[in-house]
Image (spheres, rainbow, N blue to C red):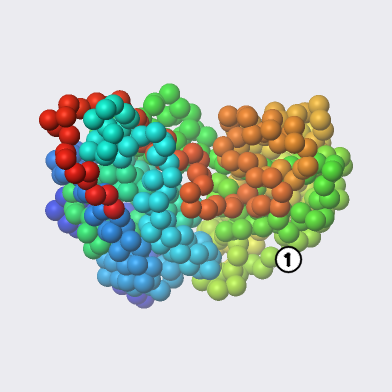
Amino acid sequence: MPTPVMIDALGPNGPYRARHRRLVEDVTGHSIGELSLVPPVFVTRAISALRRCAPMAAGQRRTALARAADIFASGEPGGMPVAEYESLVSRLGTPISHVRAAVEAIRSSAESAHLQMLTSRPAGAARDWREPGIHEGGAVWIRRGDVFAVHTAGNHPAVNALWLEALALGYKVALRPSQREPLTPFRLVHALREAGFGDGQVMLLPTDHAGADLVLAQADLGMVYGGQETVDKYAANPNILPNGPGRSKILITADSDWRDALDMIVDSVAAQGGVTCVNATAVYVEGDPTDLATALAERLAVLPSLPPQDSDAVLPVQSAASARALAQYLSTQAEGTRAVLGADRVVDELGDGSAVLRPAVHVVDDPSAPQLAIELPFPSVWVAPWNRQAGTKPFRDSLVVTAVTQDVELFEALLTDPSIRNLYQGHHPTHWMAVGVPHDGFLGDFAMRSKGVITSPSLTPQVARAFS
């Protein structure tokens, strides 16, 4: 058996191997490593060290992020080559082809974090008080704090691409990794440190649940991932940015043919194994949804059941016990719906203690059915009828809505609904993303603010500062 990976905390004085460690097990129940869990006193001292460290200059941050992109994608940060990393993460249940795609997504995000930061800055705000014109009065874009805490999710490694912008903005980052999949943040923090971010700029602080709350409490701002209970827990806290269920949706109106959109619908439901917040979990069609649901089920049913290390695998894998529990939950929640691919077909055991989570398709009879809000970590989709009387209400609180429609008034109604965070018209899958386009708003919207500034001529530099 390969030697288990020691996933140490990365604190203010380098790697730290805690006395209290947790086994990280793959989907078959075999251990692949040990995760150090630091005590509260370590968290407190680490956050204090982050506060004492001066932020890097903008040009240095940009250069270091670009270096980290290359180190993460092709180097050996933490002594872990990329091929070994990809193999280990796939053993945790994410198909290896998806892990490889996540490596590219993280590399691209690190390279473009500086551009994403600039895109999110208000046009009327300067990056620095030394810019020309500020002495006459203007706005300067500043951080809302110094230390940014992140609780990463373990559902997919690419989620770690989203917090890198905090470093580009000049924050010091305290990262609490998921105990389910700590390898990606562990390797990424090593890459950032090798690239030039000091021990006092970015830290990896694995903790238990009590310690996780302490990380958030002692930071200035925080970003967390979780279910609806996580969103509800932090909804009233202006210093915490919760990322919960996406509940992404597709709408096909009567002026468009769902057959032309079927490839996009399948892709939206099943891409990346259907585990991300931007995967579609509900499809609405103006009229009878039966034919669309049947065609969608036929396409999803042919996806192969393979171990996650197989390069042709596309579906997520969990322990057989976890998979059966999810299927039972789906069966209970789906009562009163019409199963096209039912819960009884979700679990496909591989004979080694693990099971593939296969797609599920159910039809509901009402566009306001409660099942349409249920999001599960595999391709599980609810297909519903929609009519003009239902309006835009069924699409509220969606991360993404893809509307296949030619109805301008409907599009504008969806666009002006503040609870719909992204809106795509036409045959664009719900998982579409691009540099310069916000995912759930820009991180800068949350982490930064514009401050009015005016200076006297005696303080104004004679030569404008050069910016990278």
> Up-down: is 213 above or below 85?
above
The amino acid sitting under disc 1 is Val
Residue 402: name its quadrant.
top right
Residue appearing at x 44%, y 64% in the figure: 103
> Up-down: is 461 above or below 341?
above
Out of 144 and 295, give the one closest to the viewer. 144
Mark 1: secondary structure? loop
Residue 366 image offset from top left, x and y in percent: 79, 33
* Number of marks in picture: 1
Residue 449: name its quadrant.
top left
> Up-down: is 336 above or below 307?
above
- Residue 303 falls left or right of residue 100: right
Residue at mark 1? 302
Residue appearing at x 43%, y 41% in the figure: 120
Residue 41 in view in this figure: no
Question: Which residue in the rendered view is the most extreme toward the bottom?
Answer: 1
Residue appearing at x 59%, y 52% in the figure: 431
